[in-house]
Image (spheres, rainbow, N blue to C red):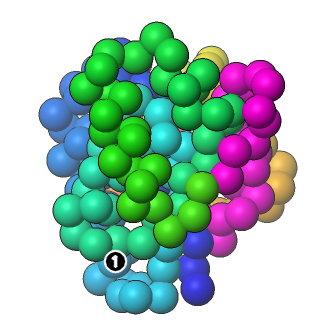
Amino acid sequence: MHKIGIIGHKTENLQDPEFAEKELHRTLDIITFQYKDDCAINLGGDRGIDLWAGNYCLEKYIKYHLFLPCLPNKFSEFWYDEQKNILNKQLEAARAVTICSSESNIEFERDVTLIDNSSFIICFWSGKKIGRTFEAIKYGLKANKIILDGFDELKLITNSNIKKEGKYGNF
């Protein structure tokens, strides 16, 4: 079974959330067409890309595994009620749930576990060289994972891409 990790920004860090959600759905459609029933999506359960992907998986009956940095009530402590309800629905329907730590809310540890348990990664990254998504990409590359850009036709992200000026260098 192919385990495909999805990582990306929280809603507030996305320049165009509608475009991001549309691209996420398009990407999941491509993946499920390619792999049919031989895939499961690994998700981090966070606001933004993760919750949208979970909802789409529920809607399309796609198998998924949730990786949370800590217990759900601590993880979603400061979320809106609607966001908490979405997470709870996704927890109930998940094929599997992994709680990376019962004490701390260390999202990077969750990302490492998700990446380590994925065949390859699709990331929805703005190109900024800071933040959790960028750190997860760097870790994935060090772990020799294939990382594809969900915003750019599943273009391969390499070490040289993340070292250049801009997302893929100056064009």
Is residue 23 something that shows in the picture?
yes
Residue at the location (28% across, 51% down)? Answer: 55
Residue 148 on image: x %, y %: 51, 57
User: Is residue 120 magenta-colored?
Assistant: yes
Q: Left or right? Give the position of 155 relative to 134.
A: left
Q: Position of residue 125 (x, y in %)?
A: 47, 36
Tag 1: Cα neighbours inside 10 Å, few (<14), some, or many (≥20)? some
**Element marked by disc 1:** helix
The quadrant holding residue 130 is top right
Is residue 148 left or right of 154 when viewed as pictured?
Answer: right
Question: Which image quadrant: the C terminus?
Answer: top left
Residue at the (46%, 61%) spot, across then down:
94
Which of the pair 14/81 is nearer the observer? 81
Which residue lies under the disc numbered 1? 32
Q: Which image quadrant for residue 12? A: top left
Relative vertical location of residue 94 with respect to residue 100 in this rendering, above or below: below
For image coordinates 39% across by 41% down, the residue present is 88
Residue 99 falls left or right of residue 149: right
